[in-house]
Image (tube, helix red, strand yellow):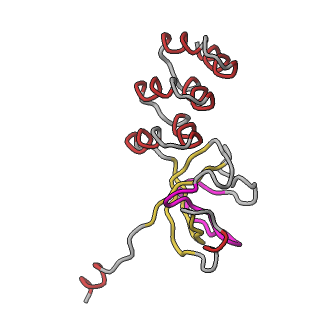
Amino acid sequence: MSQLSESKKTPKIFGYKLLQADLRSLNGKFQYIADQWVEVPGDGCYVAVSGGLYAGGDGPVLVQVECKVKVPGTSEHTPEGVVCFRQVKVSPITDPAVLERLSHDKHWEVRRAAAAQITDPAVLERLSHDKRWEVRRAAAERITDPAVLERLMHDEDRRVRRAAAERF
């Protein structure tokens, strides 16, 4: 009997979420705590499980969210790809492979958020050529290669130039 129970365990559900720098929700109504399960009131935590990451706004911190207990009756008003969960655990994304994959995302907000957490010099150098200044600036804030910083100090956008100059 216990083997049958083990095989019927619910698979873990993971998604992504953008938060403020202090891990507060973008609307400021809920404070998450890294690596701790929390119960989110109201509609619960809006989690991008298959899209819609930037639908709630833009934030500087990209976290992975482990989810439990889906909130019933919220699917009518959530963006496509977003699911609401009552219990969640947010964790910083530390897996370089996950960050590298996210650095290729079609949405610049995701690439920018990934760039702010990436440490791989080759990935940061690639992102320093991104078409969006926000992604280039986030990469410049992490780059340590003087040659790449020198190039970025001549970027077309003043915000990228400033970020590169501060690191040089």
Residue at 35% over, 77% down: 9
Q: Position of residue 92 (x, y in %)?
A: 52, 47
Was residue 42 drawn as part of the magenta stretch in this picture?
A: yes
Q: What's the magenta region?
A: 32-52
Q: Position of residue 59 (x, y in %)?
A: 66, 45
Specify whether 29 is left or right of 69. Answer: right
- Depth check: give the residue in front, 78 or 87: 78
Residue at 45% over, 39% down: 104
Q: Look at the image and tell me in which quarter the C terminus lies.
A: top right
- Depth check: give the residue in front, 128 or 16: 128
Query: Which quadrant of the figure has residue 166?
Result: top right
Q: Position of residue 90 (x, y in %)?
A: 55, 56
- Depth check: give the residue in front, 103 or 35: 103
Was residue 131 drawn as part of the magenta stretch in this picture?
A: no
User: Where is 97 relative to 119, above or below?
Assistant: below
Q: Look at the image and tell me in which quarter the N terminus lies.
A: bottom left
Q: Residue furthest bottom?
A: 1
**Labels in figure, total:** 0
Query: Which quadrant of the figure has residue 46?
Result: bottom right
Residue at 51% over, 22% down: 143
- Depth check: give the residue in front, 72 or 156: 156
